[in-house]
């Protein structure tokens, strides 16, 4: 028992960590978690690409090839359960609504492709 406790004290922590982007980039980022993680590869679902801005919260995970970032904290305050929102730092936004409509910035397109004017 005491031996396993002594060994575990010296073992590296292999849990996911919350960190903050300190150097943004398109091919890799740097984030401050419990230590400074450099040249992190960022992973996202296939077909999605983004470059997390400075200060954005990310999850840092250990991997066989070093640490990786798996995404930023979701900010879904203005959408309903089941909806999807994509936004940029500059304010561009696309929302996939539960009723089948799509909002691109303020342009609303219904599920049949008809543009709805407010």
Image (tube, helix red, strand yellow):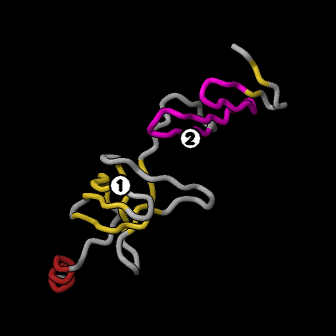
Q: In which quadrant of the rendered view does residue 118 lie? A: top right
Q: In which quadrant of the rendered view does residue 105 lie? A: top right
Q: Which residue is mark 2?
A: 86
In this rendering, position of residue 105 left or right of residue 29: right
Looking at this rendering, what residue extends furthest in the bottom direction?
A: 3
Nearest the viewer among 64 and 90 is 90
Q: Secondary structure at mark 1?
A: loop
**Residue at the (41%, 51%) spot, across then down:** 52
19 is higher (above) or lower (below) than 43:
above
**Residue at the (29%, 67%) spot, across then down:** 38
22 is higher (above) or lower (below) than 108:
below
Q: Is residue 94 magenta?
A: yes
Nearest the viewer among 8 and 41 is 41
**Residue at the (32%, 48%) spot, across then down:** 54
Image quarter where the N terminus lies is bottom left
- Looking at the picture, how far across and down is residue 112, in whole percent? 84, 31
In this rendering, position of residue 100 left or right of residue 85: right
Range of magenta residues? 84-108
Nearest the viewer among 3 and 43 is 43
Q: Judge the density around disc 2: few (<14), some (14-19), many (≥20) Cα neighbours within 10 Å.
A: few
**Residue at the (21%, 64%) spot, across then down:** 35
- Looking at the picture, how far across and down is residue 47, in whole percent? 63, 58
Q: CA distance from mark 2 to mark 1?
A: 19 Å
Q: Which residue is mark 1?
A: 24
- Looking at the picture, how far across and down is residue 26, in whole percent? 44, 59
């Amino acid at each position: 028992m005491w031996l396993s406790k002594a060994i575990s004290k010296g073992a590296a922590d292999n849990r996911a960590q919350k960190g903050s982007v300190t150097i943004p980039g398109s091919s890799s980022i740097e984030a401050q978690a419990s230590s400074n993680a450099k040249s992190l590869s960022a992973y996202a679902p296939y077909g999605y690409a983004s470059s997390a801005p400075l200060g954005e919260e990310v999850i840092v995970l250990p991997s066989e090839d070093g640490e990786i970032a798996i995404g930023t904290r979701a900010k879904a305050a203005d959408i309903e359960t089941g909806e999807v929102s994509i936004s940029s730092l500059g304010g561009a936004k696309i929302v996939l609504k539960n009723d089948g409509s799509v909002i691109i910035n303020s342009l609303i397109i219904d599920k049949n492709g008809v543009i709805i004017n407010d």
